[in-house]
Image (spheres, grey):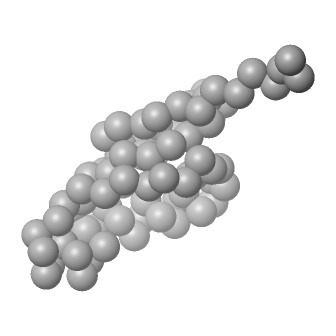
Amino acid sequence: MLDLREKYDIHAFRFQDDIFGLDMKWLRNFTEAVKLLDIRYRSFVRVHQCALSGFAEMLYEGGGRHVALGIESGSLC
């Protein structure tokens, strides 16, 4: 991301991983690393993650400005 920002002046990214941030320890490490890059990003998350204490704040602190929610019905029909 740093190379893309410096070489091409790209400051916004999209993470297409439907389990982005599922591991809170990973998200903390990611946030600490990317907040120094001054970027913005959008990501996919699962609905239950939004209810976790500090989750939304960590996304925002690291540059997250848009989330897309995956909703699964679990229906066998």
Q: Is residue 53 visible?
A: no
Relative to 13, residue 53 above or below = above
Examine the image and state in which quarter residue 52 appears: top right
Residue 18 x %, y %: 59, 47
Q: Residue at x 28, y 68 (%)?
A: 36
On-image quarter of the N terminus: bottom left
Q: Which residue in the rendered view is the most extreme toward the right?
A: 76
Note whether 19 is above or below 9 in the view shown.
above
Query: What residue is shown at x 55% (from left), y 40% (from top)?
Result: 45
Q: Quadrant of residue 13?
A: bottom left
In the image shown, does 25 or 21 lie closer to the viewer? Answer: 21
Count of numbered circles in the view: 0
Residue sitting at x 71%, y 27%? 72
Q: Hey, which residue is sitting farthest front in the picture?
A: 77
In what quadrant of the picture does the C terminus appear?
top right
| Residue 11 horizontal/vertical position (percent) | 19, 61
Q: Nearer the viewer, residue 25 or 72?
A: 72
Q: Is residue 35 visible?
A: yes
Q: Residue at x 12, y 74 (%)?
A: 8
Q: Is residue 1 left or right of residue 38?
A: right
In-image side of 55 versus 9 (left or right):
right
